[in-house]
Image (cartoon, rainbow, N blue to C red):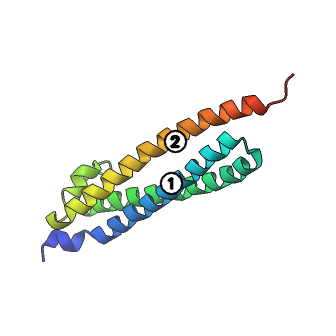
Amino acid sequence: MNPVDSILDWDELVSALRDELQEKGGLIRLLNQQTETLYRRDHVENERLEDQIRNQIRLATRCRQARDLILRQTAARLDLPDDTPAGEILGRFPEYVQPLLDALFLEVDRLSGRLEERLRQNQQLKERFMVEIAPAT
């Protein structure tokens, strides 16, 4: 066994990335529901979804933080600085696991971009929705 294999617990990182993907996927599902709710102008359902979305954002954030912690711990085990880019750390994992890690990181980045876009779209819809239902003064 390669000494680097024994130092690096890549299963832990894979698990953290999968958890992050799952929670971000759940957040996208809720945001899609919110989009539909906003188009229906269902204020009560939107309020319920807002609570769920806030909770899901907290879960996704915790998953990202767990992943970042694993990367920092891995960097420390390799005597690298805390702020070493993820790509450099990933390059230290065994070759046979690098494609999996690369694919998971790529998917996390892709979902993060979709989340940012959906959050922005829903915010614009909420602003429009709130203006239309606000009482005239």
Residue type, numbered disc 2? Arg
Residue 90 at x, y percent in the picture: 23, 57
Residue 114 appearing in the image: yes
Q: Quadrant of the N terminus?
A: bottom left
Q: Which element carries disc 1, helix, strand or loop?
A: helix
Residue 63 at x, y percent in the picture: 46, 59
- Residue at 19% in and 56% down: 91
Q: Quadrant of residue 121?
A: top right
**3D distance between C-alphas at marks 1 and 2:** 17 Å
| Along the viewing direction, whichever of 4 and 102 lies nearer the viewer | 102
Q: Quadrant of residue 102?
A: bottom left
Check the image and report above or below for 27 versus 118. below
Q: Which mark is residue 80?
A: none
Q: Quadrant of the C terminus?
A: top right
Check the image and report above or below for 47 versus 135. below
| Along the viewing direction, whichever of 71 and 97 lies nearer the viewer | 97
- Residue at 41% in and 49% down: 111
Classify 10 Å Cα crowding around label 2: few (below 14), some (14-19), many (20 and above). Answer: some
Residue assigned mark 1:
61
Residue assigned mark 2:
118
Q: Which element carries disc 2, helix, strand or loop?
A: helix
- Residue at 72% in and 51% down: 45
Residue type, numbered disc 1? Thr
The residue lying furthest to the right in this view is 137
- Residue at 15% in and 63% down: 95
Residue 134 at x, y percent in the picture: 80, 31
Classify 10 Å Cα crowding around label 1: few (below 14), some (14-19), many (20 and above). Answer: some
Which circle, 1 or 2, is nearer the viewer?
Answer: 2
